[in-house]
Image (cartoon, rainbow, N blue to C red):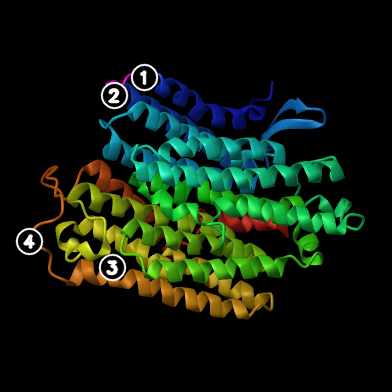
Amino acid sequence: MNVNTYIPLFVILSSFVPALIIFRLPQKRHTLRTFLNLFGIFMTLFFVLWMFIGVYHNQEYLFRLPLLPNLDFSLKAGALALFFTGLSSILWFITTIYAIGYLEGSAHSSRFFGFFSLCITATIGVALSANLITFLIFYEILTLSAYPLIIHRGTEESRIAGNKYLFYTIAGGALLLLGVVWLYVLTETLEFTPKGFVYTIVQEHHFASMMIFTLFIAGFGVKAALFPLHGWLPLAMVAPAPVSALLHAVAVVKAGAFGIIRVVYEVYGIEIVTLLHLMTPLAVIASITIIYGSLRALFQDNLKRRLAFSTVSQVSYIILGVAIAGPVAAMGGIVHLVHQGVMKITLFMGAGNFAETLGVHYISQMNGIGKRMPLTMVAFSIGALGMIGIPPIAGFITKWYLGFGALDSGEEWVLFILAGSSLLNAAYFLPILYRAWFLSPPQSWPDEQIFSKTETKLSLLLPPLITAFFSLIFGLFVATPWSPLSWVQLIIEREFY
């Protein structure tokens, strides 16, 4: 028996099995629930590291289980799949530590952490899927498992947000299902293939190929928050801060962007998408979303809503990098999966700390907050400056490669989008930093909690400091062999170009 065959399945089970057990735990079993969470995470990280080493040395990890005639439930760990798997598993660990400090002891903890683990199971399943049918299964599991997290508080506002989330994402899933079935009827295969497999039908079914691509982009665009399919995302910010971090940096939004990457590169292939003249429309939609999200963020006083519209803008950098259709731009877009993840999770955990410790939910309440919570605000500042594109933080690397990639591909107009976006990023982040660091704090905060002699709970403080540190070192040490950019270069060379 080849053990490598089952490693992708073990990765899925290492979060799925603890989730099933956690669902059955009584509320008072805090210690066991924490142990199961951490045990699942460490098992996942162990298997993911195993596969990283193996894939680097060209080993294959492929698990197949017959599902339908000529269709398998199939998991495969390639370089791209592991890139997203690594992001999901590491940030799952950090977010879980944060969630334990933020929510453990509150009502329905077992339900929350069960669905939390199930979300990660689905996200890793999306990453490791070897074909579109497996991808679709996990993608819809992710849709359903995120819903209870969004409505966790049980308020009317959260239920409205959850219902809108379901309406958008189920409609997107229906479009995906239609596209998958249509493509399978024409090609008789759904296997992800380096440089795509649609070339076999594109001459005979030119219009159908274009329509299927449109269905895929619309379906994945709902979770990726492409304009005008983004409406669910700002409303979902009524969820607790760990859920916001999960939605924006680890799971739902990234799954949509990752789906678009796989469609462009491993279903259609760059040459076919270019031949069908679909790259420019995709780049235009991504660019509109980038500017639109930034403009909407400017006018939000609620901190989490401003961060939500920032996500609408920032995730489309990934899609823009793919749509420019050149290896340099692709590196900038794909690496932003990680760069945006570590920066945005830092920002949401910082916002959660302000809300949990001081009752601060609005930017207008943040005067002098850097003096009361300096470490949290340092982490938040690093994330914000990275989003603007200030060197040497990771966000600068993304924009540098996108800019050079645009020039390399003859798409100079993209530079104006990047410049305008950076200016807008500065316009909605710098006033927050000015308020926090340079204005005088109020005599009292809206709902100040005294946890200890430190500024907040250690379990709430350490996670954003760690992810802020990642945001820095991914920019400072971008040329090292272990940086995310180096692994993206491996993906580009082996799988796409």
Q: Is residue 26 magenta?
A: yes
Cα distance between the residues tagged 3 and 4: 19 Å
- Circle 1 sits on which residue? 25
- Which numbered marker is on residue 31? 2
Q: Residue 339: x percent and y percent? A: 47, 58
Disc 2 is placed on an element classified as: helix
Quadrant placement of the N terminus: top right
Dots 2 and 4: beta carbons under 8 Å? no
Disc 1 is placed on an element classified as: loop
- Circle 3 sits on which residue? 432
Cα distance between the residues tagged 3 and 1: 41 Å
Which comes before the other along the chain, label 2 or label 4? 2
Q: Which residue type does callout 1 highlight?
A: Leu
Q: Is residue 368 magenta?
A: no
Disc 4 is placed on an element classified as: loop
Q: Residue 399: x percent and y percent? A: 51, 70
Foreground residue among 57 and 63: 63
- Circle 4 sits on which residue? 443
Cα distance between the residues tagged 1 and 2: 11 Å
Q: Which residue type does callout 3 highlight?
A: Ile
